[in-house]
Image (cartoon, helix red, strand yellow):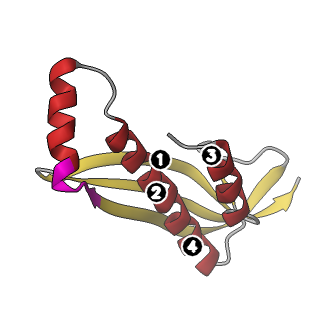
Amino acid sequence: MVKKKDWKVMEKELEGIIVTTSDEVPGRQATKYLGYVWGTSVQSKFFGHDVLAVLRGLIGGEITTYTCMINDAKHEVIQRLVANARALGADAVVCVRMGSGQVSPGMIEIFAYGTAVKLKKK
């Protein structure tokens, strides 16, 4: 699971760039749309983890190794999204969406995308 300190680290990495799922930032106005930005990561687990996951699946319950892998991947793709926005000179990324899809058996892609914008106070 994501620990509280991990969120603090992520907030520091995002410093200066607002990331939101909404289409605007309260108290701010988008003055320029800089373009589409994204982050993506393809993940797989070590074979031994797959065997343990199958066994866990037989008895039920959460497969924490996969939960941790997905949470780490989400953290990573948001960092990449922000890096792309920062390269464009953005103040924020609005309309952020995340998703996932199977690339091949045992591999999953996690992605995030949004619109990089410049902001000014209203």
Q: Assess disc 3: are there few (<14), some (14-19) or many (≥20) residues with their C-alpha within 10 Å of its C-alpha.
A: few
Question: Which callout, 2 or 1, points at the residue further toward the start of the chain?
Answer: 1
Sequence-first disc among 4 and 3: 3
* Above-or-below relation of 13 to 86: above
Count of marks placed on residues: 4
Q: Amino acid at mark 4?
A: Ala
Q: Do the CB atoms of the residues marked 4 and 2 lie less than 8 Å apart?
A: no
SS class of the residue under badge 2? strand
Is residue 7 one of those drawn in magenta? no
Contact check, label 3 and label 1, Cβ < 8 Å: no
Residue at numbered disc 1: 97
| Residue span colored magenta | 43-48
Residue in view at x 68 percent, y 62 percent:
14
Q: Is residue 119 left or right of residue 64?
A: right
Residue visible at 35% across and 53% down in the picture: 110
Mark 1 vs 4, N-terminal side: 4
Mark 3 vs 1, N-terminal side: 3
Place of residue 22 in the rendered image (x, y in percent of width and height, measured from the top left): 62, 42
Q: Whole-Å distance between the Cαs marked 2 and 1?
A: 6 Å
Q: Dot 4: what SS?
A: helix
Give me the C-alpha separation between circle 4 and circle 2. Answer: 12 Å
| Residue with the mark numbered 2 | 113
> Which amino acid type corresponds to the residue marked 1 in the rendered image?
Arg
Q: Nearer the viewer, mark 4 or mark 3?
A: 4
Give me the disc on residue 83: 4
In the picture, the disc for residue 44 is: none
Would you say the residues marked 2 and 1 are in contact, meaning their CB atoms lie under 8 Å apart?
Answer: yes
Please tell me the numbered disc located at residue 23. 3
Q: Amino acid at mark 2?
A: Tyr
Spatial CA distance of label 3 from label 1 is 11 Å
